[in-house]
Image (tube, helix red, strand yellow):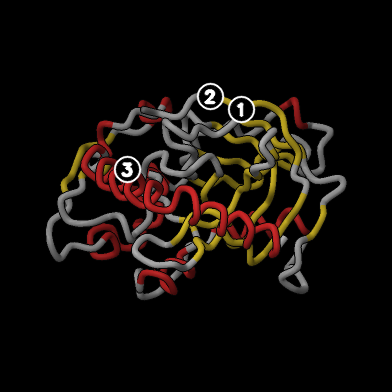
């Protein structure tokens, strides 16, 4: 695995390095400009909650604005605290208590009634649900593939787990450090041999990955970007340990010959 990553990095640097840097920088800037108004992103479940649009001001934090409800607000907006910056507009429920029971996914999913574990991912909602015998155990927001790098849809199965995985192709912006993909769960390998994972990453409030499914990993963001000061959200770790039935003993790649089924449906908002 390590040797293959080194080969891919070398090949990428020799052939496409300058192009990737330029395109990545442009794409990142374009995305930031386009999605500063998260109120314009439409999810089917928006109709279930009465909300209003609020533009964040300099010096405001989600914790100060919403107290104990800040976690509910970030999940509703599918955003993390590092991206909730001044000038960004977010959806704020008129009654914050309405968010305590909010989930855009069905509480029961009959096609998974025979599965001890089953993962449902709704790209239209940008949400993932973990089911046990067809009953929703927990749900979490995601960041799926952006327009040019869509997440594949259909039926899959988790085939590998890697607690300390990292990208073979992409770096932390502005550095030469491989992008961390902590608590990674592989669900697909395409014809070119590119693997698709569910893993910890940035969750900026809109589809932004290269095809993988991203989940909250605030500890990684603290280590790489210095924000947030007190990491709390780690959905990637929660899902990872649910799949494995506990913590991984080490950082080796773990094969999952009978991993949970995964069904990815819907279309990411554009």
Question: Regarding mark 1 in the picture, which secondary structure is present there?
Answer: loop
Q: Quadrant of residue 252?
A: bottom right
Disc 3 crowd rating (10 Å Cα; few below 14, some 14-19, many 20+) is: few
Closer to the N terminus: mark 2 or mark 3?
A: 3
Name the residue: 73% across, 34% down.
156
Q: Where's residue 125, x and y in %?
A: 47, 32
Q: Residues within 10 Å of mark 2 (few under 14, many from 20)?
A: few
Quarter-wise, where is residue 71 in the image?
bottom left
Q: Secondary structure at mark 2?
A: loop
User: How far apart are labels 2 and 1 at the CA level?
Assistant: 8 Å
Q: Of the two numbered discs 2 and 1 on the same chain, state the one appearing first in sequence.
A: 1
What whole-number distance in Å separates the C-alpha atoms at marks 3 and 1? 23 Å
Which label lies toward us, 2 or 3? 3
- Seen from the viewer's position, the closer of residues 93 and 167 is 167
Residue in the image at 49% along x and 25% along y: 267
- Comparing labels 3 and 1, the label whose residue is closer to the camera: 3
Which residue in the rendered view is the most extreme toward the left?
A: 58
Q: Quadrant for the C terminus, please.
A: top left
Q: Residue at x 62, y 62 (%)?
A: 6
Question: On residue 27, which mark appears?
Answer: 3
Q: From the viewer's perspective, is the residue at label 2 or at label 1 nearer?
A: 1
State whether residue 6 appears in this view.
Answer: yes
The residue at which mark 1 appears reads as 153
User: Visible in this render: residue 93?
Assistant: no
Instruction: Tell me, for residue 266, which label it has, or none.
Output: 2
Q: Residue at x 56, y 44 (%)?
A: 212
């Amino acid at each position: 695995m390590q040797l293959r990553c080194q080969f891919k990095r070398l090949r990428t640097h020799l052939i496409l390095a300058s192009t990737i840097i330029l395109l990545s920088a442009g794409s990142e800037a374009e995305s930031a400009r386009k999605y500063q108004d998260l109120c314009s992103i439409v999810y089917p479940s928006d109709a279930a909650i009465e909300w209003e649009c609020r533009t964040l001001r300099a010096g405001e934090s989600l914790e100060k604005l919403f107290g104990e409800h800040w976690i509910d607000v970030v999940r509703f907006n599918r955003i993390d605290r590092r991206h909730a910056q001044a000038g960004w507009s977010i959806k704020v429920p008129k009654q914050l208590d309405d968010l305590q029971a909010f989930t855009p996914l069905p509480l029961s999913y009959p096609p998974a009634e025979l599965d001890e574990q089953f993962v449902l991912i709704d790209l239209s909602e940008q949400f993932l649900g973990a089911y046990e015998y067809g009953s929703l155990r927990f749900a979490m927001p995601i960041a799926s593939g952006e327009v040019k790098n869509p997440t594949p849809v259909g039926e899959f199965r988790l085939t590998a787990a890697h607690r300390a995985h990292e990208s073979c192709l992409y770096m932390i912006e502005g550095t030469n450090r491989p992008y961390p993909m902590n608590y990674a769960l592989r669900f697909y390998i395409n014809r070119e041999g590119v693997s698709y994972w569910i893993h910890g990453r940035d969750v900026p409030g809109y589809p932004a990955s290269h095809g993988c499914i991203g989940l909250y990993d605030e500890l990684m963001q603290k280590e790489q970007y210095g924000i947030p000061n007190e990491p709390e959200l780690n959905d990637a770790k929660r899902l990872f340990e649910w799949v494995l039935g506990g913590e991984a003993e080490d950082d080796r790649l773990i094969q999952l010959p009978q991993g949970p089924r995964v069904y990815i449906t819907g279309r990411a908002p554009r």
